[in-house]
Amino acid sequence: MKYGYARVSTKTQATQGNSLEDQIRMLKEAGAEEIITDAFTGTKVDRPGFSELLSKLESGDELIVCKLDRFARTASEGSEIIRDLLDRGISVNILNLGLLNNTPTGRLIFQIFLSFAEFERDQIIERTQTGRKIAMENGTKMGRNLKFNTDQLAHALELLDSHSYTEVEHLTGISVSTLARAKRKAKLA
């Protein structure tokens, strides 16, 4: 049986760019009879759909994926998964690379392409970190926006002089944990 596997990093990506729909269409065109999908980042170990698929595969089956990075995070992980599949008599068809089977040439080609996939991922991470560093140097603040401004926090801290934390929380909407953190920070300043 021919199984297809499609993954997107986030649920919103499911309809953008390298979408689930695009992957599913390519997998069907390649002959996938059953397709399993996941919406998890490739850096997460827990991908329930992929785990389910691995347990279904039997000798003589074929696993079809659009790109190697859809199921392998690193060269070592991809190598381990594919080696296991090949040893179990399962062929792996990576649509942008070709069919990998348990022959010396197939294993060599796989190792070379896996190294390129890991290199590409590392390059993306490096470019992202460089861009983030440049943005921060240019004054861009990273992280989520503060829910309360400094004036609101200062007022809430003044109220703590005559009210309990719970009362101040009800009056201002600022949580007890945020108030406690702000008070500790004010003492250090």
Image (cartoon, rainbow, N blue to C red):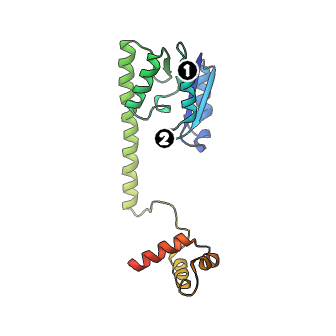
Which circle's residue, 1 or 2, is located before the other in the chain? Answer: 2
Is 103 above or below relative to 137?
Answer: above
Q: Is residue 109 left or right of residue 150?
A: left
Q: Element under label 2?
A: loop
Q: Residue at x 51, y 61 (%)?
A: 144
- Label 1 to label 2: alpha-carbon separation: 22 Å
* Quadrant location, the C terminus: bottom left
Foreground of the two, 129 or 101: 101
Q: Residue at x 41, y 48 (%)?
A: 128
Residue 52 place in picture, x, y as percent? 57, 29
Type of amino acid at the residue the image marks with label 1: Leu
Residue 18 place in picture, x, y as percent? 55, 35
Q: Is residue 18 visible?
A: no
Identify the residue under disc 1. Answer: 57
Q: Is residue 25 visible?
A: yes
* Quadrant location, the N terminus: top right
Is 126 above or below relative to 135?
Answer: above
Quadrant of residue 118 in the image? top left
Identify the residue under disc 2. Answer: 44
Res 68 label = none
Q: Residues within 10 Å of mark 2 (few under 14, many from 20)?
A: few
